[in-house]
Image: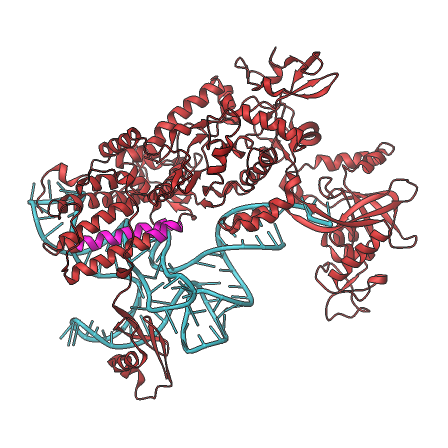
Chain colours: A red, B cyan
Amino acid sequence: MKDHGQAVTRYNAKEAEARWQKLWAEARTFETREDPKRPKYYVLEMFPYPSGRIHMGHVRNYTMGDVVARYKRARGFNVLHPMGWDAFGLPAENAAIEAKVHPRQWTYDNIEQMRAQLKLMGLSLDWSREIATCDPSYYKHEQRMFLDFLKAGLAYRKESWVNWDPVDQTVLANEQVIDGLGWRSGAPVERRKLRQWFFRITAYADELLSELDNLPRWPDKVRLMQQKWIGRSTGARVSFALKGRAEPLEIFTTRPDTLFGASFIALSADHPLAESIARSDAKVLSFIEECRRLGTSEASIETAEKKGYDTGLKALHPLGDGWELPVFIANFVLMEYGTGAIFGCPAHDQRDLDFARKYGLGVVPVVLPPGEDAKSFAIAFEAYVGDGVLINSAFLDGLGVEEAKMRVTARLEELKRGRGEVNFRLRDWGVSRQRYWGCPVPVINCATCGMVPVPAKDLPVTLPEDVSFDRPGNPLDHHPTWKHVKCPHCGGPGERESDTFDTFVESSWYFARFCSPQAPGPVARDAVDYWLPVDQYIGGVEHAILHLLYSRFYTRAMRRSGYLGIDEPFTGLFTQGMVCHETYRSADGRWLSPAEVTRDDQGHVRETATGEPLAVGRSEKMSKSRKNTVDPTEIIATYGADTARWFMLSDSPPERDMEWTAQGVEGAWRFVNRLWRSVVQVSDGLVPVGTPRPQEMSEAGIATRRVIHKSIDGVTQDLEQFRFNRAVARVHELSNALAELAGEGAGERWVLREGYETLARLAAPMMPHLAEELWRQLGHASLLVDEPWPLADAILLVDDTVTVAVQVNGKLRGTLALPRDAARPAAEEAALALPAVARALEGRSVRRVILVPNRVINVVI
RNA sequence: GCCCGCCUGGCGGAACCGGUAGACGCAACGGACUUAAAAUCCGUUCCUGGGCAACCGGGGUGGGGGUUCGAGUCCCUCGGCGGGCACCA
């Protein structure tokens, strides 16, 4: 074909995309409202932190969500697909410190920029529902709900150990402590006991665990991680009397069956008993201080030696007559778990064994492994933790481990020296942050009345605008006037709580706010009842525990306060992989960004500016530190959003990491153009829109129709199952088949129309702008986005003739074209008649023939 | 240390429930068009032996073993990579 100039050979993505985006916006195509007559579908991607620029991770996430939203919309669902901003957080304050901008200004500027960037992607979002969590119109509802939670006992304040940075004068999260030092100040972090706010997530520990089984559309991996995080363990609480003390000591164990193998008791350094002894014993005090200095970082735990200090106290075994056990303070016992005290059974716990060997304590085996002899069995340096039969254990002798656990627990209960107990690893969620850029905890501290919640009518408690970040610590504390208020209770002088909430609180309910973003209360009940739960939630695995667990808790807390009627916020969850890129490094160790390098004719990578050759490193997650990032806006400016979206969905399965390559984008861009060009070229010769299917059709035409309808069926299943890479491959296949038919002269004009219309429809969720363009080119006046999803003709999905593999002893010897569902004798005969089969048989007799209908004929000799 | 996942051409990956391994794309190579290049179009490409050729054979899904008429797929085992948790009593 002759080149008729630029207009015919090149698709102007930039112009076309802007045009369609404008039309969708004008038609308010994606604005949604409740409609009880239609089935709803709520698609949500984890909302972004407004860092200032979108990155490829966002592009991948929002492309996937948009494919789902557009597909479900075409299937007739009333689709809610909103977007907002997770707008509180530390980076805004850092910007305030470094660039002297107000966090609010910085945040809203960033939102402005990112919204413009996102809009270029052509996402089917209902922008009328946009929310920013730093807006008082959002967080005032959070404060309102906090008051409800307070009343319901789901929020409370207690003293708790925290990581304290003495220079920055703030609490640090565990993630912000690196090798025992504050991440910003570099100062050694101290453990301090501070009054902190908590959400009682543990109240729902059992439910949060058991309901994981009712989330079949969540990845197993995430459910498993949450299971482990909640960490339910069954055991017993056992009471040990202490010689010379009135108060008994309680311990928790999951192995009450090994109670007769006890040889010591160990207390946490933070245990009240340890602290009480320390008051009269300087040596104990210095040991406790040594334990505390060890800190909580992973490295220190790993390298720390198991150490104990014998307090000289004696505990009396609850089942032994006058049996005394030494009481140690040990550095490996955590106050936060169980009762902060344990009994040590060295024979059946490795850590206890190490401890016993170090301090010369007894090692008595009480569980006999199968096949061992009770007289000769001994423990050396490896504890036995498996199943077996109880020995040396009085009334438990001869029982299995499980049976023994039950029996001993029952006996302890009779004696009132213990009872069965379930413990969780999960702790209550500490939500206090000593930060400015967060939602203020709506509480006033009064010298007379104590803690007084801010009355609902006084909400919101807004952040003061005039703050200074000149000195370390919480600006809310330093503010001259903000925190000084009258006590709402007695009218006397009070002080505002200056803690703000962890930003995870905002993200724990934003999905509910999206249902009715203008509601005067936190939510409008009819709106949440209609829209919730979220049918499909999409985001990174990094939120597998924190955000997803908090949201599950918060939903229950909202239910308890009457805001919602559901338990689980997200019925479907998909965790997408990361976007990676290869890395470039110069000889002197500088990292270079993909934009700064060129590939020469030999395939060597050079720095564009200097021509210096570069080392190409392995592909890693795009990150600023490695400089291996590609700016989505530049890609969209060059190739258009559809190309970026198409490449994002190609090749790699969505749950896996993908590699971003320049060649890959080029390939996607070529396909966009090829598709556009083939429709432009073919459209003039097609039958008019709406022409009924002709009675007569050529073989090639019928064959192509089969491909078309199999494509509909295949793409539909692929999209339903999040197999976007396969959907992409199928669209390629259909495009190839149509090009082939078009190449065969006049071809079947009707079939070509059906084919290209189908192609446009199937590609629309993934490349929405191009699809509209093709639809228009094919002669339609309507918007494709309002067209229904195509339906496959079931008759065309089954072939009349099938290709069957013919094997001899499982080895492929040839193929056979047979009528569908061919009967055994005919199929067998045809198979045996194949020359390759006869050759393989070499005259040997056939023992039997395995026939898998329409698939395989296996001749066994 | 414990738990989970993964391993298929030069690369990303496909292969429904055990039934023709390598779809589709990238890259590479060859050809056409062009004064030339780019773009585009056509063709080839898992490895390997034989043959001028159409063609005929052998091997192959991280290694080893097993189940089965038949294994990328199921089981055992070893190795490698990735992720999660980590003093949890």
Res A190 quadrant in image: top right
Residue at 43% x, 45% y: name it: A577
Left or right: where A605 falls relative to A182: left
Q: Quadrant of the C terminus of chain A?
A: bottom left
Res A629 quadrant in image: top left
Q: What count of labels does the image hold? A: 0
Residue A568, given in percent of the width and then of the height, sits at: 54, 42
Relative vertical location of residue A390 with respect to residue A790 in this rendering, above or below = below
Residue at 70% x, 16% y: name it: A489
Magenta segment, principal secondary structure? helix
Residue at 66% x, 44% y: name it: A425
Relative vertical location of residue A825 with respect to residue A765 in this rendering, above or below = below
Q: Which residues are magenta?
A: A716-740
Left or right: where A170 falls relative to B63: right
Residue A824 shows in this picture: yes
Residue A851: in magenta span? no
Q: Residue furthest front?
A: A37
Res A391 quadrant in image: bottom right
Residue A652 shows in this picture: no
Q: Nearer the viewer, residue A611 or A189?
A: A189
Left or right: where B46 falls relative to A308: left
Residue A721: in magenta span? yes
Residue A38, given in percent of the width and then of the height, sits at: 39, 41
Residue A850, given in percent of the width and then of the height, sits at: 37, 78
Q: Nearer the viewer, residue A24 or A507?
A: A24
Residue A578, given in percent of the width and then of the height, sits at: 43, 43
